[in-house]
Amino acid sequence: HRQLRRQDLLQNMAGFASSSLIELFKSDAPLLPRDIVSAVEAESSLATEVDPETGNTALHYACCMAAPLPVVEALLGANKAAARAEDADGNIPLMGAVANGCPAAVVKAVLRAHPAGARARFSSVGAPPPKPPSQRAAPAGDTRHTLLHSAACHGASAETVAALIAAWPGAAR
């Protein structure tokens, strides 16, 4: 979580509502969670932005940066559909939240917004682009990693693991 001094904050946030939240996430500009929340509450369209290079939404970036719950709740409140959004690699925000050690409360919030996300699977590096969601039913014997695998590999809390299993008990089989 990037922190900054008050005078830097004021400079960075000047005109924020007309700036791109995506560009701020991608920059080295220090950000404070309360300022992201305030900006999204003031201008909800910030939560609907999509990075044209990566397909990431502001929620993707927040989850990959292990943002605290108030940031994720503000983004979901302004754009719940972002929880289902796939980036250019087929990743949803929940994948970033689990892989980057977001608190269990964040994982649960994203799961509530997109319960089917618990069944997401990671593609192999170098794999062809993902199929559209309607064509992506996992075949029997699918060996791609689940979010439960990711949680185990990244040392997720027991609470996060329990939430993932509760959302998709089949992942533990």
Image (cartoon, rainbow, N blue to C red):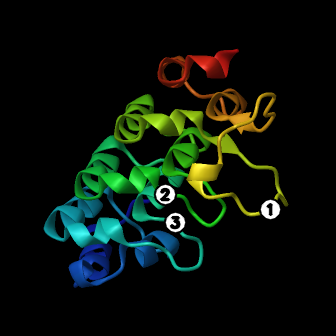
> Do we see residue 5 in this rendering?
no
59 is higher (above) or lower (below) than 137: below
Q: At label 2, which amino acid type do we have? A: His
> Residue shown at 32%/75% (left/top)?
8
> Residue shown at 29%/62% (left/top)?
36
Left or right of 8, for residue 115 = right
2 is higher (above) or lower (below) than 120: below
Query: In terms of secondary structure, where does tag 1 sit?
Result: loop
Left or right of 82, for residue 148 = right
Q: Earlier in the sequence, mark 2 or mark 1?
A: 2
Left or right of 136, for residue 66 = left
90 is higher (above) or lower (below) than 50: above
The percent coordinates of residue 142 (x first, y second) are 78, 34
- Please identify, in this view, whether the residue under mark 2 or under mark 1 is nearer the observer: 1
Q: Are marks 3 and 2 in contact (CB under 8 Å)?
A: yes
Query: In terms of secondary structure, where does tag 2 sit?
Result: helix
> Residue shown at 54%/53% (left/top)?
64
Query: In terms of secondary structure, where does tag 3 sit?
Result: loop
> Do we see residue 32 in this rendering?
yes
Which of 157/74 is in front?
74
Snapshot quadrant of residue 44? bottom left
- Please identify, in this view, whether the residue under mark 1 or under mark 3 is nearer the observer: 1
Q: Which mark is residue 56?
A: 3
120 is higher (above) or lower (below) than 91: above
Local crowd size for mark 3, using a 10 Å CA cut-off: few (<14), some (14–19), many (≥20): many
Which of 137/90 is in front?
137
| Mark 2–mark 1 distance (CA, rounded to whole Å) | 21 Å
The percent coordinates of residue 98 (x first, y second) are 56, 38
| Mark 3–mark 2 distance (CA, rounded to whole Å) | 5 Å
Snapshot quadrant of residue 19? bottom left
What residue did someone put label 2 on?
60
